[in-house]
Image (cartoon, grey):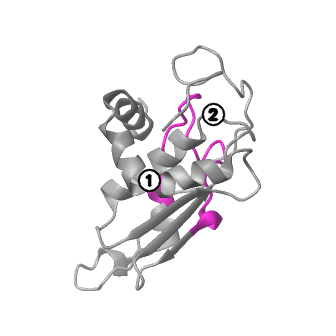
Amino acid sequence: MVGGGGGGVGSGLLENANPLIYERSGERPVTAGEEDEQVPDSIDAREIFDLIRSINDPEHPLTLEELNVVEQVRVQVSDPESTVAVAFTPTIPHCSMATLIGLSIKVKLLRSLPQRFKMDVHITPGTHASEHAVNKQLADKERVAAALENTHLLEVVNQCLSARS
């Protein structure tokens, strides 16, 4: 699912050696209504963004938020319809890590959200040379499942999802 080639994990070469680093947004304050267990709490775009903002980039010791790969404005949620759509923007148009980044976002959502949610994780239109191919891979449930059966790939995804020390 994730191509070999040029740079990337384990090769020692960085495709984007000096990425722009963006400031992290503040933590969302928890409201009294959200803490009240008696009140139904719908899932919103900020909650999804909070789940994915701290995913680690596979090439840099930075988060997807710090690299501006994910932004809250590119997250769409409909709790009543049980849908989540996340558009992500690779740092460069030929990023070989785009599929891995998308897979990491998808796995984080699969592990965090109720099963009723249908997820669409895709590249922001016009921001990657192979966006159609990457989006097709990320939308294919069988390919995603097969990718997650690959122990090495799953290990890399888990590294992206683990908290940095």
Residue topped by disc 1? 106
Identify the magenta region. 49-75
Residue 114 as seen in the image, left or right of residue 131: left
Local SS, label 1: helix
Residue farthest toward the top in the current orientation of the protein:
12
Q: Please provide percent x and percent y for residue 56.
A: 50, 38
State whether residue 28 appears in this view.
no
Q: Is residue 57 magenta?
A: yes
Nearest the viewer among 109 and 28 is 109
- The residue carrying mark 2 is 96
Q: Position of residue 106 (x, y in %)?
A: 44, 53
Direction from residue 122 to residue 19 in the image, left or right: right
Q: Residue at x 51, y 35 (%)?
A: 2
* Element assignment for label 2: loop
Q: Quadrant of residue 20?
A: top right
- Category of crowding for the residue at label 2, using alpha-carbon neighbours closer than 10 angstroms: few (below 14), some (14–19), many (at least 20): many
